[in-house]
Amino acid sequence: MPVKFHIRERKDMFDRFRAHWTPTQLVVDADGNEIYRIEGFLPTADFLTHLEMGLARAAFSAGRFRDAERRFGAIVERRADSPEAPEARYWAGVSAHQATHDARPLQETAVALRERWPDSEWTRKASVWNSGGRTTGS
């Protein structure tokens, strides 16, 4: 449910969520816990990508791993050249792993990141999955 606060009218909310710049958009869970933060102005396509990242992270946090995988995958498909795409690919693989407890999605993610985004920080984070061995994550 979208909610909008203006800093002059609800400084308490800005303080609660440590919003130090406007605009700040947050995706929060039902308990009001922050899941994802978007700060500053963005072009529409970039903003929508970040919003979808937030919704995907919310699905992941709620344990809806297949939904999260689908949402992250859609970002990769629609915005493969965006800066968010490698992160979305990483989390799509983690979501698939969480849904199945199978290491193959992690290994496939490491390969896909290395091939498409070799210099990404997300490729480096996934590099431990290249070995083909068991993972320690759950």
Image (cartoon, grey):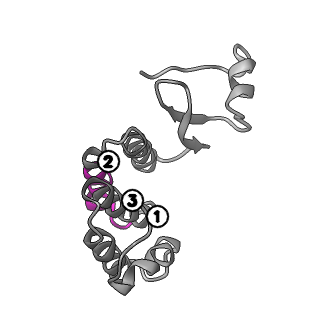
Amino acid type shown at disc 1: Pro
Give the class, few, some or many, for how many residues have Cα within 10 Å of label 1's Cα (few <14, many ≥20): few
The image shows residue 18 at horizontal and vertical percentages of 72, 34
- The rendered magenta stretch, by its main secondary structure, is classed as helix
Measured from the top left, where is residue 108 in percent x and y? Answer: 28, 75
Distance (Cα) linking label 2 and label 1: 19 Å
- Please give the residue where the numbered disc 3 appears in the rendered image: 91
**Camera-side residue: 44 or 25?**
25
Looking at the rendering, in which quadrant would you find the C terminus?
A: bottom left
Amino acid at dot 3: Trp
Which segment is the magenta one? 69-81
Amino acid type of the residue tagged 2 in the rendering? Ala
Q: Nearer the viewer, residue 51 or 36?
A: 36
Q: What residue does disc 1 label?
A: 83
What kind of element bears circle 2? helix
Is 76 above or below relative to 110?
A: above
Circle 2 residue: 68
Q: Around disc 2, counting alpha carbons within 10 Å, would you say few (fewer than 14), some (14 to 19), or many (20 or more)? A: many
N-terminal-most mark, 2 or 1: 2
Using the rendered view, name the quadrant where residue 116 is placed: bottom left
Q: Is residue 45 magenta?
A: no
Q: In the displayed structure, would residue 101 be above or below residue 1?
A: below
Question: Residue at point 71% right, 26% down?
Answer: 16
Q: Quick one: label 2 or label 3, which is nearer the N terminus?
A: 2
* Residue 85 sits in quarter: bottom left
Which label number is shown at residue 69?
none
In this rendering, would 88 be left or right of 17? left
Q: Does the magenta-highlighted stretch encompass residue 80?
A: yes
Q: Earlier in the sequence, mark 3 or mark 1?
A: 1
Q: Secondary structure at mark 3?
A: helix
- Residue 15 in the image: x percent, y percent? 75, 27
**C-alpha span from label 2 to label 3:** 8 Å
